[in-house]
Image (spheres, rainbow, N blue to C red):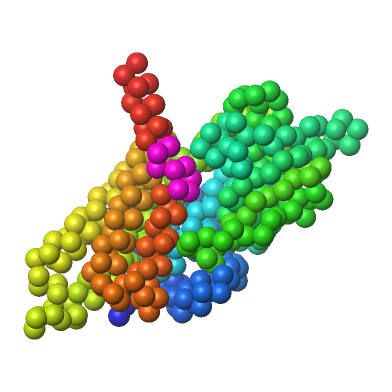
Amino acid sequence: MPRPAVERQLPDEESRALVELTREIARAELAPLVEDYEASSRYPREQMRLLGASGLLGLPYPEDLGGGGVGYEVYLQVIEELAAVWATVAESVSVHTLACFPLAGFGTPEQRKRWLPDMLGGDLLGAYCLSEPSSGSDAAALRTRAVLDPGSGDYVVNGTKAWITHGGIADFYSLMVRTGGPGPEGISCLLAPADTPGLSAAPPERKLGFSSSPTAQIHLDGARVSSGRLIGAEGQGFKIALAALDGGRLGIAACAVGLAQAALDAAVDYAGVREQFGQPIASFQGVSFMLADMATGIEAGRALYLAAARLRDAGRPFGKQAAMAKLFCTDMAMRVCTDAVQVLGGAGYTKDFPVERWFREAKALQIVEGTNQVQRVVIGRHLSRERG
C-alpha cells in the first residue's frame, strides 16, 4: 500500500515541488532496492549519484557553488521523506551535507570554487571525521596529530578516526586533527582526498542496523595533506566541528521522524486488517491508544525540528534547539518503532516485515551525532549560560 502523504508546512510552491520530487524518487528508485541492499550490506552509490544529479545533495548551500539555495526548513523535510523509505539514504545525505559544511562555511573563496561544486553535485561523496577510539563524546580530547612539514608544505597526519560513516567509500574526508596543544584550541580541520597516501580504512564495523551504510575506522599513518587543504585557520577546527554538528543533529532528527512515520504507517495498516475476536485489532482501545501516542510523538518531533530549522534559517542561535530536536526525535523514534513491533506481534519480530529493521535503525539514531546523554549535557549548559 502506498505511504500516505504527510501534511507539510512548506513556504512556497517551489518547495512543495521539491518535496514531491523527493517522494517520487524515493518511491520509484529507492523503495524497490531497500531490502536487497540492506540484506547484502550493499551501499547505494548509484542512487546517491542520482540524488546528486537531481539537486538533492547540496540543498542548503549556495546556488552559485552548485547547491540548491534552500533553507533548512525545506531541506530537513526532504531528509524526512527519504528516511521514511530508506533510512540509510537519508542518513547518507545528512552525513554528506555535514562533511561539506567545513568547506562551505569556512573555506576560502578559492577552495570553495575548486572543490565544492563536485561535492554538492554528488560526484564526490564525503565523510566527517571527528570521533576517535578514545574520544567519542569527549571530542575535544582527540589525539590525531598533524604536523606541518615546512620543507614540503604538507601536514603529516598520524592517528585513527572511529565510527566514520562512509569510511572506506568516501571520496573526501573532513578531518579534525590536533595541530597545537591540548584542548579545543589545538584542533584544526583538514580536507583530505580519499587517495591521500597513508590514509586507509579498516574493515567496516559489524553493526546492528544500517547494514548498507559502511561505518569504519580511518587510519592515518604519515598521511600527507597539503597545507592548501587547511580549512579555516589553525586552531579553528573545534569551532568548525561544533557548528557542523548543530546542523547534523537536525539532519538526524529529521531521519528519526521519517523512520518513525514509516513505522506508524505500517502499524496503522496492519492494525486495520489484522483481526482478532472477529474485529480489526485497531478497534481495541489498547492498540488504538498506542497508535495515537505514536502519532502524537511524531507530530511533536516534526514541530520541534522545524522550529529549530526556522531559527537557523533566520540566522538566530539554534544550538540548544538542535540538541533538543535530536534528543526528542530519536528517543521518540525508538519508542515508536518498539511499539510498531508490538502492534504487529510475532509478525513484527520477523524479517518478513520491515518494522524489525526500523527498530534496529532507530537505536543507532540515539547514538550518532552525539549520544542523547551528550545532548542533555549540551542543553543543560545552554540553560546555565542563559541564567548567568
Q: Is residue 121 visible?
A: no
Q: Which residues are magenta?
A: 367-375
Q: How many marks?
A: 0
Front position in the image: 108 or 369: 369
Q: Is residue 164 left or right of residue 302?
A: right
**Residue located farthest toward the bottom when viewing the structure as drawn:** 278
Front position in the image: 362 or 109: 362
Name the image quarter holding the N terminus. Answer: bottom left
Q: Is residue 287 visible?
A: yes
- Residue 228 percent across, percent down from the top left: 77, 39
Q: Quadrant of residue 85?
A: bottom left
Front position in the image: 142 or 328: 142
Residue 374 belongs to magenta span: yes
| Above-or-below relation of 173 to 178 | below
Q: Residue at 36% of width from left, 75% of height from top? A: 350
Q: Residue at 44% of width from left, 75% of height from top? A: 31
- Residue 225 percent across, percent down from the top left: 78, 42
**Residue located farthest toward the top when viewing the structure as drawn:** 388
| Above-or-below relation of 75 to 29 | above
| Above-or-below relation of 239 to 352 | above
- Residue 197 percent across, percent down from the top left: 82, 50
Name the image quarter holding the C terminus. Answer: top left
Q: Is residue 64 left or right of residue 320?
A: right
Q: Residue at 80% of width from left, 49% of height from top? A: 198
- Residue 190 percent across, percent down from the top left: 69, 40
Q: Residue at 51% of width from left, 37% of height from top? A: 137
